[in-house]
Image (cartoon, grey):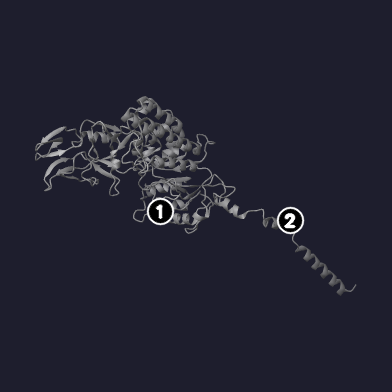
Amino acid sequence: MSHKAKGLLILILICALCLSGCRESRVIEEIIYDQASKDIDFQNDLKVAQNREDSRNQNKELPKKKSEQTDKKTDEEHQASKKGNEKNEGEASNTKYDPDTKNNDANDSSGTKTGERGDKEQASEDDSSAGASNNPNDRQIYDANGTVVDLPEQVNSVVAAGDAAAIVQMLGGKSIISGSSTSFTANSLVGQVFASQDVGKAATLWQGDGTSVMSSSNFNKLLSMKPDVCINVSGQGSFSDSQRSILKEKKIACITLPALTSSDNIQDAVTITGDMIGDRSGQKGGVNAKKLAAEYVSYCKDMISEVKGKTGLFTWNNIDFNTGKKNAHSTASNGQYTLYLSDWENTSYTITTNTGASLYKDSSGVAVAPQGYSKSPLSYFLSVAGVCNNGARFVRDNRSEYAAVPLNRNVFEHKTSGSHIFYGDTNESFARVKSGESIDIGLGEQNFKAILVESSSIKNKIQASDTWKVYGRVTANNVTDYGFLAKDGSMVTSYIRGNYDIYVNPKGVGSWTKGSAESILGAKWVAWKFHGAYSESQVKSEIKKFYSKFYRYNLSDSQVNKILAGS
């Protein structure tokens, strides 16, 4: 064979080998076929990934994603929640959480979805999947703003202020709170009840109850601690907008709980916190938070039903003091009235004539009464126990509190140099209930026999004040009424008709009046104090039962007495 023929044969063999190498293998053919198979439902896989309600394989551990019709609206609402309050970056709007909707107009979150510190990608502001986790081990929940928040698989370190910290500690168990406010860390009962749960190791990051923005130095301390979750309560300014932005950048989850101003909101806050913490029962001293949260909600509902069955519901003008809506009807045959005073302002209080002449002066100060139906859970638990908080009826000017005096302001000019002003209607009084011509009840009468105060110091101020004295009847210009004679001999009418009691509201690990997991106990306490529906021993037993079940601590008799004394 010639060299030319041999070369041609070699070239033919090389081409044949190349062609055989380009042929798809049997394995590749099978993979391509499987990917194109009609048995795979790509649309349902997308639903599963988004945890949509209409998916066949919904993951119940994730929050439900609404159907496509509401996705656009949810995204718009989510973007709106990012705008914040430009006037005060540390002030969050005081908004009630509505459990019937996943969008709330609370403005105390940046609206962005933060997640675990790790390798998650930072989502852009206009990305509808912002905050979506790339880690399959992470979890997601809705907070009170309706925002989906990414969480690590296990939450073991939480920063929360005030009564929110007590809820976290109740549901999480040992070593769960890593930072809080002095109202929690300096509470001696907290240290006793949670001593075995390492609560003493929690850093103090806020002064007071944590309603003011955390200082820069303490915020830097928080960042160095690297907690799993930071909690903000709606209506409180615990974190500024810029601080929340930094938490997002650091991939530290920030969850907003509903304001603890009503029974419903407290139960919702406990439920969200339980979902956030999950099951830590496998750890030493840990708790199955989700299970305990459900038990707490059942306990509250049973307690409300029991107390109402004893006393009957008593409200004003068919207002539901839990929601502020007009849909309640009193069932109590003989309801009681009271007045809750939350504070005392050290200022001067004067009464003058229209010409400015001084008739009366009290330099000891004025009492402060919160107004509105849902400003404190106490008003609702009072109504459950057959008692109406008279101060809850006063709603005007969007103010949260008013100066409260028991004297008639209809004739003379009443002034205070403090920051709190009087309610606008001079014919109304916090110490008097008047409805139509047949009802006119003053403080000290049978159906208005006591007032409630936040602390023993307020009680002492009232007892020392001339304004709150029981004067009895006096006569001026042939008119006899309750009150006293002013400097010019004219009568200053008082709505205090007789001796009255001053009850200091109980306080334990949490505040019973400002809103905490313990507020529910107030219903049975009120039913005892105002109606005798329970005995003192029954109320003490209930407090011990609550602490044992939810705080896993057995109170001594001395500790129970201190709780009831509000100390």
- Which residue sits at x=84%, y=72%? 8
For the residues carrying marks 1 and 2, which lies nearer the camera in this image? Answer: 2
Give percent across and percent down for residue 118: 53, 50
What is the three-letter code of the residue carrying label 1?
A: Ser
**At 41% across and 41% down in the image, what residue appears?**
264
Kindly identify which numbered label has been placed on residue 288: none
Residue 174 appearing in the image: no
Q: Is residue 118 above or below residue 432?
A: below
Image location of residue 459, percent across then percent down:
26, 34
Q: Nearer the viewer, residue 76 or 215?
A: 76
Question: Which circle marks residue 242 in the picture?
Answer: 1
Mark 2 lies on residue: 27
The number of callouts visible is 2
Q: What residue type is labelled 2?
A: Val
**CA separation in Å, label 1 and label 2:** 55 Å
Give coordinates of residue 531: x percent, y percent.
32, 29
Q: In this view, does 487 lie above or below 55?
A: above
Sequence-first tag of 1 and 2: 2
